[in-house]
Amino acid sequence: MVRAHTDPDYSAAYVVIETDAEDGIKGCGITFTLGKGTEVVVCAVNALAHHVLNKDLKDIVGDFRGFYRQLTSDGQLRWIGPEKGVVHLATAAVLNAVWDLWAKQEGKPVWKLLVDMDPRMLVSCIDFRYITDVLTEEDALEILQKGQVGKKEREKQMLAQGYPAYTTSCAWLGYSDDTLKQLCAQALKDGWTRFKVKVGADLQDDVRRCQIIRDMIGPEKTLMMDANQRWDVPEAVEWMSKLAKFKPLWIEEPTSPDDILGHAAISKCHNRVIFKQLLQAKALQFLQIDSCRLGSVNENLSVLLMAKKFEIPVCPHAGGVGLCELVQHLIIFDYISVSASLKNRMCEYVDHLHEHFKYPVMMQRASYMPPKDPGYSTEMKEESVKKHQYPDGEVWKKLLAAQEN
Amino acid sequence: MVRAHTDPDYSAAYVVIETDAEDGIKGCGITFTLGKGTEVVVCAVNALAHHVLNKDLKDIVGDFRGFYRQLTSDGQLRWIGPEKGVVHLATAAVLNAVWDLWAKQEGKPVWKLLVDMDPRMLVSCIDFRYITDVLTEEDALEILQKGQVGKKEREKQMLAQGYPAYTTSCAWLGYSDDTLKQLCAQALKDGWTRFKVKVGADLQDDVRRCQIIRDMIGPEKTLMMDANQRWDVPEAVEWMSKLAKFKPLWIEEPTSPDDILGHAAISKCHNRVIFKQLLQAKALQFLQIDSCRLGSVNENLSVLLMAKKFEIPVCPHAGGVGLCELVQHLIIFDYISVSASLKNRMCEYVDHLHEHFKYPVMMQRASYMPPKDPGYSTEMKEESVKKHQYPDGEVWKKLLAAQEN
């Protein structure tokens, strides 16, 4: 058996777009990585940069679909993707910066920019290529127009109550039982009612940890499991039959993210084409968007609309570096303008690394409170960027010096 | 509609492994790209290099499955793949170099190394992760053991007659009708009986070009079409209904390479998990392996064995830079030891850039003649590498200087 993500060293490729507008506004974009390989993503960002440099923001967002295609269908770079892996992560970082810049110039947080945007304009941000057999431009427009009904009330509700979250902070692999118990007790005290536990390394260990957490949270609260691609299909079936008694709501990434037919429940996917098929094949009961793996707001819009068409609840992936900050905008927009439902819906939350962000998430009563600062909440504190920049930041210099000794 | 690959500038990431064996043998590996983005692949090769440096070749090939997993499941780099896009192309280049080194040390071309290898050893090179629901180690062993029957005769046959090929050199998009006719006439003279035409940019243009080529080759010879991912699913259906009268044997890459459910015939895929599903979903009538997109010989072995299990003919993708040189080893091995059939089988051939290789393909009577030099035919001429190295090679210096003026 293979352990995935055994030694993550949370990192990010961070893109800053400056303009000649003299308003001091910068667009900041991010994509999360596990450490090594960030330099590969940065290299891809540089290869994409010429699509953005010396362009006018108005021209970009005025034909956002065209710009999206230009980035994802670069005649030469397409070969080393297309729309997957390193190149797509780099595309996400660049586009996230564009969205941050646009929202800041409009003086709105991204979720509000989206909520207030005319449905025709929203649709013009989406590339429908390869998904028209499931979602056409007309379908999308119809969904968004229906979503206008009751929008005002849902926006008020979000501002008052926030979007429901679940926590993954308690039950990572490798935590001792004592740590697990302590974190779980604290989370219960803080009002959390939905918990995710990482599984898949050792079955006996999983059974013991799931027992502890189910005992502590009681039979009514919600428990999810995440296997991080650890299993083959038959292995997944066997393993899950042993864990079923703990009543998980879902089991996440049981196998390869490329295995559409092997999937049973929920998966982080790399583009809208994979999501389309999971929906077509009825292989998803929940759909997990990601703000840094898909092609930014643009591609996530198409996935949110497909999920609506198939009436599959969207429960975003978050954590990492900045994923919570970004994805809250998408899911709050989804509730107000697309899904209009909170049933079986919740957004992942991990209590980690928010201190590096200039506009960190605001959690209240286990919910994401809608951000009010303009932009995509992607901007990092200058101090943090300076300290953690590879390889010249203070933190890295110390680490590298220690390695040499 | 989107044009894919509109301005390719054929390039390659080229990996050379040197050892301390003092036998002067180098392992050369390659992965093909369309130009920009090669530097991103090179960056990923550097990120993977530490898995190879200072290792003993004996240890690597002695546990080749373990080594393959180490490369493809690096705890941190896995995030920016896994097993797709830039990272997987880099993995292919590194592993191709290892196979070249191994075969050279054994004094055999790769196809012969594979043909002579004990089935248990062959199976030990394959990572069965994510495919055991379709192909287990036992299945693979059984197929390979059955393949021993008649092996000697098939090897003799290959050495005498070669492996049948088809040509894509006549009918690229953008060729004038005159050029098309001239190239087609020459190919017929040279004994070619199977032709592939690129389609998908303009329907009227396609109809005219297909008519020309079908008229020239007559009704009996074989015609294939390649749409290079240009269509959505409904568009593909409409377009193909107009081209059906020219009786193509297959239509290649009608839509996104990620769209398993949208596929109808044949596709270049990025890993064994995608191939597995195309076979499971009966979405393929032909299977196209690639020597530089999949994880080298190791991953291609698993795909050849799955194709055998589903009795789907394998017709490799080639062309680019060096793809013909490499893939001939795999398909010759496939015939001798796995498929034992030539029915509906042929390997793509493009008459392009072979002059840069030290051991270029040998074509006779429109067939690939089995290479006799030790190695994987991956080694490039020193002079070619020197001239074309980016950005310091003579060719690039001239190009870059011309750009500045």
Image: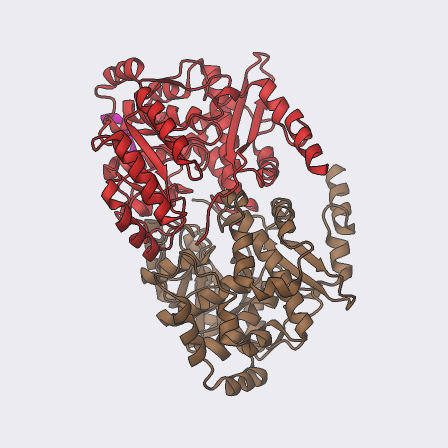
Chain colours: A brown, B red
Residue B74: % across, % down: 54, 42
Which quadrant is the C terminus of chain A positioned in?
Answer: top right
Q: Is residue B296 above or below residue A304?
A: above
Residue A104: % across, % down: 68, 70
Q: Is residue A26 above or below residue B371?
A: below
Q: Residue B65 vs residue A34: left or right?
A: left
Residue B130 quadrant = top left
User: Which of the pair B196/B389 is nearer the observer?
Assistant: B196
Q: Residue B26 vs residue B173: left or right?
A: right
Q: Residue at x 32, y 57 (%)?
A: B234
Q: Is residue B82 magenta?
A: no
Residue A17: % across, % down: 70, 59
Asked if one can make out residue B139 in the rendered structure from this viewpoint, the answer is no
Q: Residue at x 44, y 79 (%)?
A: A145
**What secondary structure predominates along the stretch shown in magenta?**
helix
Residue A220 quadrant = bottom left
Name the residue furthest front.
B178
Q: Is residue B249 above or below residue A82?
A: above
Per the rendered image, the range of residues in magenta is: B140-146
Which quadrant is the N terminus of chain A positioned in?
Answer: top left
The number of discs equals: 0
User: Which of the pair A6/A125 is nearer the observer?
Assistant: A125
Residue A386: % across, % down: 77, 55
Asked if one can make out residue B362 in the rendered structure from this viewpoint, the answer is yes
Q: Is residue B345 above or below residue A19?
A: above
User: Which of the pair A16/B202 is nearer the observer?
Assistant: B202
Q: Residue B150 vs residue A150: left or right?
A: left
